[in-house]
Amino acid sequence: MNVLERQRIALRYTFALGRGNLSTFLSSLSMLGLVLAISLLIIVLSVMNGFDKEMRERILSLVPHITVYSHLPIAQWQDPAAAIAAHPAVLEVSPFTHFDGLLMRGTDIETTRGIGLDIEDSAVLARMLASLGDEAIARFRGQPDALILGVGLADKLNIVVGDQLNIIVPASGLDDSLNAARFETVRLSATLDTGTELDQVAALVHMQLASRVAGLDGAVNGLRVTTRDIFSVQGVAWELLQDLPPGYYTTNWMMTHGNLYAAIQLSRDLVSILLFSIIAVAAFNVVSSLVLVVFDKRGNIAILRTLGASPSDIAWIFILQGGMIGLVGVLMGGILGALGSMAVPGLVAGLEQLLDMRFLNTDVYPVSFLPVDLLLKDVLTVAGVAFVMCLLAAIYPARRAAALAPALVLNQDR
């Protein structure tokens, strides 16, 4: 029996219509299990990849990779900034001033994390305010009392662009007025919609205004450092301290967001193990289906053996059938998983509008939408593992079929 004859028989057992309905039904059931398992795994992996990508590209683009602080406010920040910028792993250095305070408009009060930005640094403004248009950035730069609020914070205060509100900052203890609080009236120039947790707390102002409100008299709190490799920040931070005078210390994104990133990676790994187990169950279904096919086709197998087919020919027929089940399941599951991954964000957004509720809110989750990042390597990995499992699952039924005794089977069928 040549290869083409084996393939023709395997095709007939797998896809035959009319006669042989049992084998076709069992094959179709096995394919359906593979399609569902593979497509589900691809969709879930794409969503987890999306969270990983948003963490790296969106959240960490707004959060400094390394933050350099001093025990005292930094009045002459240009010298340490130049020393830091000379490090080959550093992409960008910018001063900042931050403060914790209250935003008050009428009877509405909300806590905020104020950040002062250097309006002369176009690179920082472009990165921090990437979601705003050029007109909004120009308006912010042209107004000394301009304020940019996260969209979540603006909604809580029920304010719109052009409204005035007050910033209240408790005294820091760096001056003599320990019991005094500083007030500043600002005007909302834009709302920042990053889709991240910053939308709930961020208040961006000019660095001079932030320094005045924080009681630093023109000094800054520290320097924001952006590195080329976000995963080497600990080593880079240590090297930066060697080039700075005593009194400086650093923090990095791993201290503030490292647990979140690790949780995303751990969730991805655990979900992958779980769903690969589902694929293994689907492959086990191939074993049971082929065993039943062998039982159903034992008469045909006996006839083929009497016509000259060898045990290896019979075994190859069922291995090819397992491969065909796996191939169809992998192709259909991969296509369905890719299409499902691209459709999931729109479906979730539509469901949120239909139910008038948000499944993801930055009060709890790092982003306010369902991110998806479909990677070809994930599709190929899932497809390859599933196909190999199907081939391995077909070995036992193939050996059972090859071991059938033709004379005994034909005698039982008389």
Image: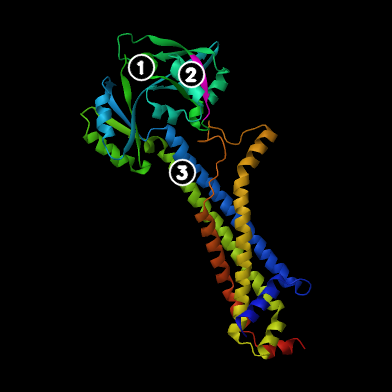
Residue 229 versus residue 183 in the image, above or below: below
Q: Which residue is painted at 68% across and 68% down in the image?
A: 27
Q: Which residue is painted at 36% across and 43% down in the image?
A: 231
Residue 18 versus residue 43 in the image, above or below: below
Q: Which residue is painted at 69% across and 64% down in the image?
A: 29
Mark 3: amino acid:
Ala
Of the residues tagged 2 and 3, which is closer to the observer? 2
Tag 2: Cα neighbours inside 10 Å, few (<14), some, or many (≥20)? few
Q: Nearer the viewer, residue 245 or 5?
A: 5
Q: Nearer the viewer, residue 194 or 297?
A: 194
Residue where numbered disc 2 is placed: 139
Q: Please identify the dominant SS of the magenta region.
A: strand
Residue where numbered disc 1 is placed: 211
> Magenta residues?
187-193
Give the x, y percent position of residue 74: 28, 22
Of the residues tagged 2 and 1, which is closer to the observer? 2
Q: Nearer the viewer, residue 143 or 377?
A: 143
Mark 1 secondary-structure assignment:
helix
Mark 1: amino acid:
Ser
Q: Earlier in the sequence, mark 1 or mark 3?
A: 1
Mark 2: amino acid:
Arg
Mark 2 secondary-structure assignment:
helix
Residue 211 versus residue 192 in the image, above or below: above
Question: Which corner quadrant of the image does residue 279 belong to?
Answer: bottom right
